[in-house]
Amino acid sequence: MRGLEGHSGRDKAPMDHAYQLVLEFEGKTLHDFDRISEFEEILMDALPADVVDGHDAGQGIVNIFIHTDRPEQCFEEAMRALDGAEPGLSAAGYRAKTEEAYIRLWPKGDPTPFRLR
């Protein structure tokens, strides 16, 4: 597991961005976990203005962390890059790094607050 160290081809560090975007996937099998780890590489290529900063896993959930200055646009670009990939996204949210609460992006229309799991 690569964990939270992540990497990117950009000179910006995670703290240089104002927001943290979290993409949540169900990762119940080793195959799911491996696929989601591959998603990080896809996202690093697809999101050159952002920093894909690794993932964490637990309780059947894998979160990918992305540092960005444009969370909604970054989310849309990430979804295009992962279009049709399995396992599919189960939830997504973002927060300003100065805030604790997340704003839910996915599923659209879900009134439940987004929380890290």
Image (tube, rainbow, N blue to C red):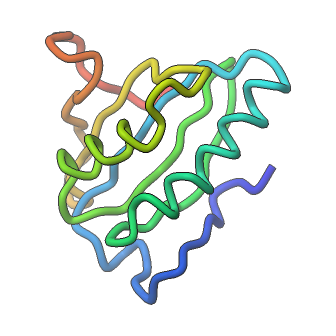
10 on left or right of 94 = right
Residue 6 appears in which quarter of the rendering? bottom right
Residue pictured at 45% horizontal, 18% vertical: 90
State the image quarter where residue 27 is shown: top right
Query: Residue 66 sits in which quadrant?
Result: bottom left
As drawn, is 86 to the left or to the right of 80?
Answer: right
Residue at 28%, 71% (x, y): give it: 17
- Residue 54, percent across and down? 60, 56
In the image, what residue occupies the spot 28% across and 23% down?
Answer: 106
Front residue of this view, candidates 24 and 40: 40
Task: Report x, y in % for residue 14.
Answer: 41, 72
Percent x, y of residue 86? 61, 22
Residue 101 percent across, percent down from the top left: 23, 38
Q: Is residue 61 above or below residue 80?
A: above
Which residue is outermost to the right?
A: 30
Q: Is residue 39 above or below residue 117?
A: below
Give the left or right position of residue 111, taking residue 43 as reference: left
For the point 29% across and 63% down, the residue is 68
Count the labels in the image: 0
In the image, residue 110 sits, relative to residue 9, either above or below, namely above
**Extreme residue toward the bottom, this view:** 11
Q: Nearer the viewer, residue 43 or 59?
A: 43
